Image: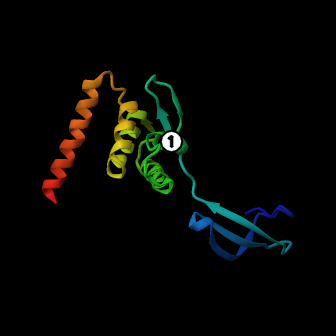
Amino acid sequence: MKCPYCNYNESKVIDSRPADEGTTIRRRRECLACQKRFTTYEVMEHLPLVVIKRDGSRQSFDKNKVLNGMLRSCEKRPVALAELEKIAAEIEQELQNSFEREISTSEIGEMVMERLKDVDEVAYVRFASVYRQFKDINTFMDELAKLLGDKKNSGKQG
């Protein structure tokens, strides 16, 4: 690490400790030439995720867009913001852990719906109606029937 005072290329680490709730490492260093001390931060590098939209265009993944979509679906519903933030963070982490650097909006939508189904069924149906672009009442009813079928099947297992 280059010294910010004398530009010497070598320093020694005096102290290391986690920072920012364990997402960063703070290192206290001392220059081997001028003996001045300085602090560096080590942060994990996140590879950029690219979202492929329905029209074929691409843009960077934005966790806030996922969160905002869920917030609209959960409007006037008893769902805590912390729960939605947790879901958005889980989805982002799952995408980061995958080997894919490009993901379609449909895959992200499926991930959101899978999690919303367990949190709030009304929010799930609202999100699905926008995401799946229901053309008429029949496609809406089909989605409700699937949800009710899943609920019956999970009730039989438990």
Q: Identity of the amino acid at label 1? A: Leu
Label 1: how many residues lie within 10 Å, few (<14), some (14-19) or many (20+)? some
Residue 112: image location, x then y, percent = 39, 44
| Screen quadrant of the C terminus | bottom left
Q: Nearer the viewer, residue 10 or 47?
A: 47
Q: Nearer the viewer, residue 110 or 149?
A: 149
139 in relation to 150, above or below: above
Judged left or right of residue 153, residue 3 is right
Q: Residue at x 43, y 47 (%)?
A: 77
| Screen quadrant of the N terminus | bottom right
Q: Nearer the viewer, residue 69 or 43?
A: 69
Q: How is the image coloured?
A: rainbow
Residue 78: image location, x then y, percent = 43, 52
Q: Nearer the viewer, residue 96 or 108?
A: 108
109 in relation to 95, above or below: above
Residue 67: image location, x then y, percent = 50, 45
Judged left or right of residue 97, residue 8 is right
- Residue ranking furthest to the left: 156
- What secondary structure is found at the residue carrying circle 1? loop
Residue 133: image location, x then y, percent = 37, 26
Q: Quadrant of residue 142?
A: top left
- Residue ranking furthest to the front: 76
Judged left or right of residue 71, residue 122 is left
146 in relation to 19, above or below: above
Judged left or right of residue 95, residue 33 is right
Q: Residue at x 64, y 62 (%)?
A: 42
Residue at the disc numbered 1: 49
